[in-house]
Amino acid sequence: MDFLNQLKTDTKIVEDWLFELSPKGDGYHSIIFESANYSISNGGKRIRPILAMEVCKLFGGDLENVKHFACALEFIHTYSLIHDDLPCMDNDDLRRGKPTNHKVYGDAIAVLAGDGLLTYAFETVLKSPCHKRAEAGLCLAKLSGFDGMVGGQVIDIKGATDKEMLIDLHKRKTGALICAGAYLGALSADAAQKDIDNVTQFAENLGLAFQIKDDLLDVLGDEKTLGKPVGSDMDKQTFVDFYGIDKATEKLNEISEKAKDIISCYGDKSKFLTELTDYLINRNY
């Protein structure tokens, strides 16, 4: 199967998993489930759970063992987007071409939907049939918390003042959950520690390349394709600000090549991950 068809198949599997495992309920508080699922079902690339799935397959794992971990990862990613869009953060009106959660449900419900998804992610991990549940939960807690994604968001709010700080910001804010995808995929397949370290290093570089491409698209992209206004990050320091368009593009290619070189040790089995890297750095949205 060629890459695009495999990606389409993987995306469908992830969507089915999310539909199965997403939070559900009724009662007087039912609006919170509606709000959470509004954002869960709002599309997206599903890169993090797909990465978890493909790394699990790379090491011969059972997809049933990675399913709950992959969905928990997407629930955390979704909560972060809901909160990131709030007026006290980025104050965005659109996410993937649709009104952001707080624009539909109000700030308070949006905050609670995000809180609920973060908590529910760990409930989802604990329901996994995989015997590595505890290690998976620890990974998610570390990479989404103070020294991971949340820490990156703090640096983003304060503003990066130099290139090193900017790289640290995005290794945390964007890269941490991408690393979690690779780590959880390898963990669910009982991969050796050297392999877990290897795919995590691959994912760290992939996450950084992903962010550089995002910054370039914020300057060069098309608003209709992006699903949000071009230049929406103009009040932040980006790779384009520090490097310029040409140097940022060079940096993008350098880091993506490093990612592919790291994963090349697995030969043909790493073909999808190599092509995924190329796909993400050449995307137009």
Image (spheres, rainbow, N blue to C red):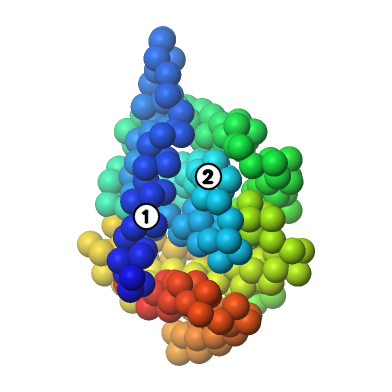
Q: Which kind of residue does numbered mark 1 sit on? A: Thr
Residue visible at 38% across and 21% down?
31
Looking at the image, is 121 positioned above or below residue 202? above
What numbered label is drawn on residue 197?
A: none
Judged by depth in the image, the label closer to the viewer, 1 or 2, is 2
Mark 2 — residue? 64
The secondary element bearing badge 2 is classed as: helix
Q: Nearer the viewer, residue 244 or 110?
A: 110
Residue visible at 41% across and 49% down?
14
Q: Nearer the viewer, residue 150 or 16?
A: 16
Residue located farthest toward the top when viewing the structure as drawn? 28
Whether pointer 1 and pointer 2 mark residues with C-beta atoms closer than 8 Å, the reply is no
Residue 52: percent from left, percent from top: 54, 56
Residue visible at 42% across and 40% down?
18
Residue 39: percent from left, percent from top: 38, 40
Q: Which kind of residue does numbered mark 2 sit on? A: Glu
Residue 144: percent from left, percent from top: 64, 48
The secondary element bearing badge 1 is classed as: helix
Q: Quadrant of the N terminus?
A: bottom left
Residue 187 can be seen in this image = yes
Residue 69: percent from left, percent from top: 58, 45
Crowding near pointer 1: few (<14 within 10 Å), some, many (20+)?
some
Q: Quadrant of the C terminus?
A: bottom left
Looking at the image, is 253 positioned above or below residue 73? below
Residue visible at 39% across and 74% down?
279
Where on the picture, by quarter, is residue 134? top right
In the picture, measured across the screen, residue 16 lies left or right of residue 59, that is left
Where on the picture, by quarter, is residue 213? bottom left
What numbered label is drawn on residue 11?
A: 1
In the picture, measured across the screen, residue 245 lies left or right of residue 172, that is left
For the residues labelled 1 and 2, the Cα–Cα distance comes to 16 Å
